[in-house]
Image (spheres, rainbow, N blue to C red):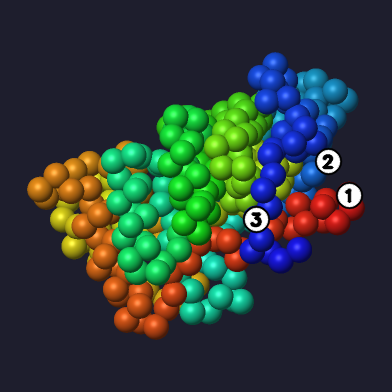
Amino acid sequence: MNASHRPLVKVGPGRSAGLGADRGADFGGILHHWSPAPVPRASLWLHGLGLLAVAAEPAVWPQVLGLVACNHALLGALMHPRSALLGPIMVRLPASQPRAVALTFDDGPDPAVTPRVLDLLDHAGARASFFAIGERAQRHGALLREVVRRGHTVENHSHRHRASFACGGLGALRREVVRAQQAIADATGVAPRCFRAPMGLRSPLLDPVLATEGLRLVAWTRRGYDTRPGDPRRVLDRLVSGLAGRDILLLHDGGLPNGAAGVPPVLAVLPALLARIAKAGLSAVSLAGVPSRPEAAGAAAGQ
């Protein structure tokens, strides 16, 4: 299957069995799909060996607890949005797209902003990916269907976009990811292939959840910080400074302050940004051409 093809599917029972996993996630299934990166793998070994050590010699529990606490502190320090030490993450487009720039919009859909973003993209002949919040997808399904109809993609940005998302346990993370996956698939008929964590902060437990759902974690090359009140020119400068092929740019079509004359920053910035991309000889694209997560491709081949 072409990597850019996005089949019209619903999230099936094999992928997100038991949205009712509210009463317990299928941890065995999660771990079965997951191939951990070296740092999480080492952490798992440390926890396992620590348990064995305490079982064999209970008196060593303070030392084991100290090691586990240091391990957790290290993992916490690695939750940076663009860190690859906790698992695979995409911060630039693949080398097969050397003259493309991916436009991504978070926190929508917003009926007051998203349609105007779509019109600006249409006017420039540009494509983009919209990382939607599941609860908003449920309220504004028709708007997401319009996003897809116009040639863009809708991706997963969690169900409730809680600030505490990265602090959740494995079951809580899975519920947030799966509920948003289902809400977006119900709204559009298309299951997302990419995920972006709220505020970009990744939990050490997120990667096994994404592996189970076949989702690729996507961050950004540079962001505009357009959710902060301020001069739209500064937002544009942050996005175009060093602009190059394969960049992934982050803007927002939801949760926005009003700028000058009551215009959300994204609407003030986007026309100039699209012009700068074109002037540089680059194309504004969605994430449709991003290859599927390797584990997901392997699982599909085995079915």
Q: Residue furthest left?
A: 261
Q: Residue furthest top?
A: 23
Please tell me whether mark 1 or mark 2 is closer to you in this view. 1
Q: Report the side of 200 relative to 174 (left or right).
A: left
> Which residue, given by chain and number where applicable, does mark 2 sit on?
32
Q: Which mark is residue 6?
A: 3
Alpha carbons under labels 2 and 3: distance apart = 25 Å
Whether residue 110 is visible here, answered yes or no, is yes
Q: Residue at x 52, y 66 (%)?
A: 92
In the rendered image, the vertical position of residue 95 relative to residue 296, given as above or below: below
Q: Quadrant of the N terminus?
A: bottom right
Q: Residue at x 41, y 67 (%)?
A: 126
Alpha carbons under labels 1 and 2: distance apart = 15 Å
Q: Which mark is residue 303?
A: 1
Task: Name the amino acid type tagged 1.
Answer: Gln
Question: Where does the image place residue 212, in percent across and percent down from the top left?
Answer: 74, 41
Q: Report the side of 45 relative to 264 (left or right).
A: right
Q: Report the side of 77 relative to 181 (left or right).
A: left
| Mark 3, secondary structure of its residue | loop
Task: Name the amino acid type tagged 3.
Answer: Arg
In the rendered image, the vertical position of residue 133 relative to residue 125, given as above or below: above
Q: Residue at x 54, y 68 (%)?
A: 93
